[in-house]
Every structure is written in structure tokens, then in C-alpha cells.
Image (tube, rainbow, N blue to C red):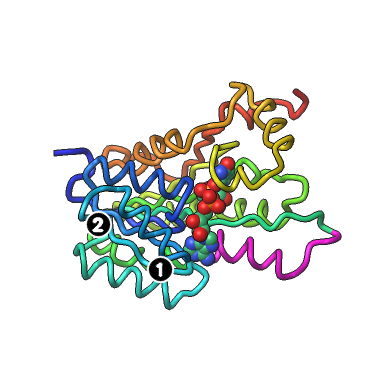
Amino acid sequence: MSRYTGRVVMISGAGQGLGRAMAERFAADGAAVAVGDVRGPAAGETAALCGVPLARPSTVDVTDAGQVDRWVADTVDAFGRVDVLVNNAGVLRDNRLEHMTGEEWDTAVDVSLRGAFHCTRAVFALMKAQRYGRVLSLSSVCWRGNFGQANYAAAKAGIVGLARTVALEGAAHGVTSNVISPGIIETPMLAALPRRARERLSRSVPVRRAGHPAEIADAAAFLCDEQAAYITGAVLDVDGGFSVGSALR
Ligand SMILES: NC(=O)c1ccc[n+]([C@@H]2O[C@H](COP(=O)([O-])OP(=O)(O)OC[C@H]3O[C@@H](n4cnc5c(N)ncnc54)[C@H](O)[C@@H]3O)[C@@H](O)[C@H]2O)c1
């Protein structure tokens, strides 16, 4: 028996990066994993990498409530329950405020925040009914504010408010809700930045390196464990000390 044997885990945006690392980690620990991504083939690649028949890929755009509801219904049909939801899907649409378009604002906020709302709402009643659930949402160190990321920072701060409210509403029903706030992690999202920006960012981390996706997956496996029942409403920085102390380094 592994730690997650018999558990059913849903992860949005799991076609690459942190979502993929978490899917592989939960699968390795024995879970059935519903791998959702707006890019269906990428979800299929992640499910294949999980290497277990209990990994099920789906094409799902989290900004579309109907698609999310169908994804949850399909997962329940396939596996009978949902124990863990990881709200991971997120996108960057960076721009200085005065140049930021309404579309850039909407896209960043809709994928991260509205998407998390859709997914959490879709699983919440059944988690409460089964008197067990773990909701984990991905924020970012940027939730405290970041130059050129008004949309992303607002969305990721919104994630904290959503998750802490879900923690209160779920607490009496065996449902926890927590947040991981990653720092600079080596994923395709980071790779999309210019090399000099990536190097500068990595140097600014107190531990002097970017994090590995597996280090986020380790934190996720900890917070979503059955034994983490007394941890709810927490925001866990997994950032090599990036958010500690002065911005002057
Ligand atoms: N990588 C980092 O350094 C870092 C740091 C802080 C926070 N985060 C957060 O962690 C999460 C994962 O980041 P990542 O680096 O793995 O990102 P990524 O860009 O590598 O992967 C994001 C995935 O989300 C999917 N996606 C995009 N829009 C979607 C939608 N509408 N519906 C469903 N799926 C959609 C993409 O297809 C992609 O597979 C995000 O919420 C991100 O904001 C990442």
C-alpha cells in the first residue's frame, strides 16, 4: 500500500510543468489521477508518463464551467470519488499597467482564479458529502505584488482569498484547503523568459538556484495527505527563501 492508494486526484493544467510533476508524484504514490489540460495531447503525454492505468487524460478548459463540470462527472464515473483537487492551471500575460489590455487582464485572471473557482465549486459538494477532501491551489510569490504582473498578482492574491474561504466552509466537513506559493521554479513558464532574466531571477533566490518541479510536488503530496487533516487555510511558500526579508539583495 502506498500513501495515496485508493485516492483519486484531479489536477488542472497538468499537461506540463508543475501539474505534470504533481501528477507523476501522486501516481507514484498510488493515486488514480485525472489529468486535465486545455491541450488534450499534452494531458495524454502526462498520463502516459504517470505509467499507471489509473491516469486518465482529459481536455478541459478551466475557464469553461460546463467543461469543468463534465470533467468532474467523468472522473467520478471512472473512479467513483474525488479526494484531492489541485487548482494548478495558470498563465502569464505580463505587461506594465498602462499598456495592459483588458484581454490580458481577463485571460490571466480567468485561467488562475475563475478556473480555480469553477473546479473547486464542482468538487466541493461531493467532498463534503463523502466527508473527506483536499483542495490545493497554486498561487505564486507574486501574489504580494510584482512589476508588470498586475493581472497575475491580482489573480494569485485572489487564489489566497478563495482558498482560505474554502478552508472555512469545508472545515466542519473533513475538507481542507491550502495554497502553495511557488517561487522561481524550472518549468516551461520560466523557460519562456529571456535567458538573462532567468539568470537574474535565480541569483536573487537566497538558496541561489531555481526550484525543481519535484520540490513543489513533494509539498503538494504533504499538504494533500490524509495526515494533514489539521492543516487548512495555510499558504506555504516553496521558494528557497525568495519571499523572506528585504527585496534588496
Ligand atoms: N513555474 C514557476 O516558477 C511558477 C511560480 C509561481 C507560480 N506558478 C504557478 O504554478 C502553476 C503551474 O505553473 P507552470 O510553471 O507549471 O506553468 P506552465 O505554463 O508550464 O503550465 C501550465 C499548464 O496549464 C495549462 N493551461 C493553460 N490554460 C489553461 C486552461 N484555460 N485550462 C486548463 N489548462 C490550462 C497549459 O496548457 C499548461 O499545460 C500556475 O498556476 C503558475 O501560475 C509557477
Residue 181, horizontal then vertical, whole percent: 54, 41
Query: Based on the displayed image, in which of its 4 quarters is residue 14 positioned?
Result: bottom left
Does 99 lie within the magenta span?
yes
Label 1: which residue? 59
Q: Is residue 160 visible?
A: no
Q: How many residues crowd mark 1 within 10 Å: few (<14), some (14–19), many (20+)?
A: many
Q: Which residues are magenta?
A: 98-114
Write the residue at 39% across / 61% down.
36
Kindly identify the amino acid type of the residue bearing the numbered disc 1: Thr
Does residue 45 sit above or below 204 in this rendering? below
Disc nearer the start of the sequence (1/2): 1
Does 171 lie within the magenta span?
no
Label 2: which residue? 131
Q: Is residue 54 left or right of residue 228?
A: left
Extreme residue toward the left, this view? 1
Query: Based on the displayed image, in which of its 4 quarters is residue 105 positioned?
Result: bottom right
